[in-house]
Amino acid sequence: MENEKKQDEIATISRDELSKVKDNLLNTNQLNFLFAKTPAMHIYERPAKGGGKWKYVTGVRVKKVLNLMFGWNWDFLIEKFDVNIEAKQVIVLGKLVVRTGGQEIIKTQFGRADIKFKSAKDEKGNRISTQQPLDLGNDLKAAATDALKKCSSEFGIASDVYAPNEFKAIHIISDSEKSDIEKAQRKIIEALDTYQGEDKADIQELCKSKVQSGEFDMEFAKNIAKQLTLEL
């Protein structure tokens, strides 16, 4: 429940606060798309080995996100692959190349898939598994999709799904928007000094919490100002 609440909160920060580099290769629209929560309709579950369930997004969803973020200007290459019949797995090394801001960003990761084997019947007519792969092409495609998703996760795509404990939704704002929010904060603080309502302490604590978490945005400021009958 605590992780879900954390993911529902959206921190508002400026581009300068987000990155320690002067020129970020991703623009504001790309960053806002990247740091937003994955829509629930695109999140699926499957049984996990050893029990429980894993959440995941499909390869189709990842490709759509890459298309929208980078304008279809990306490539995915298979650097090498291995078919291990004994381990019953295929493993591929994939390389994702995206182009933005006049430069290329490259991420590499491994992907894997279990090999599916043909079945046969024993002397008693019972169906048994053989050591003959059913369709290695499909297994390799599945491993390639897994590698693509892992490369994309290096950019932070679907990080709310694959690393929920580390995720917090972020909305990037312009310097002018940041200035407006800071002015609203000052006005509200000044108004609270003379406010005599019984909920004064609660409002002060709420505002302090929102400022510290980066969730003090203009919508929140307008709601507080309405309570204080303050014009921003």
Image (spheres, rainbow, N blue to C red):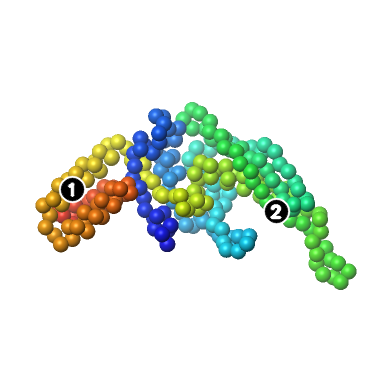
Q: 217 left or right of 35?
A: left
Q: From the top left corner, tell me how far across and down residue 202 is, in percent.
A: 22, 59
Q: Residue at x 28, y 40 (%)?
A: 178
Point out the image quarter for the N terminus.
bottom left
Residue bearing the label numbered 2: 114
Q: Secondary structure at mark 1?
A: helix
Residue bearing the label numbered 1: 189
Query: What is the number of callouts on the image?
Result: 2
Asked if the residues shown at circle 1 and circle 2 are in contact, with their CB atoms under 8 angstroms apart, the answer is no
Sequence-first disc among 1 and 2: 2
Q: From the top left corner, tell me how far across and down residue 2 is, in percent.
A: 41, 59
Q: Secondary structure at mark 2?
A: strand
Q: What residue type is disc 1 on?
A: Ile
- Is residue 117 positioned above or below 34 on the image? below
Image-quadrant location for residue 7: bottom left
Instruction: Specify whether residue 79 is in view.
Output: yes
Q: 90 left or right of 3?
A: right
Q: From the top left corner, tell me how far across and down residue 149 is, in percent.
A: 57, 46
Other-residue count near label 2 (Cα within 10 Å), few / some / many at <14 / 14–19 / ≥20: some
Residue 24, numbered label: none
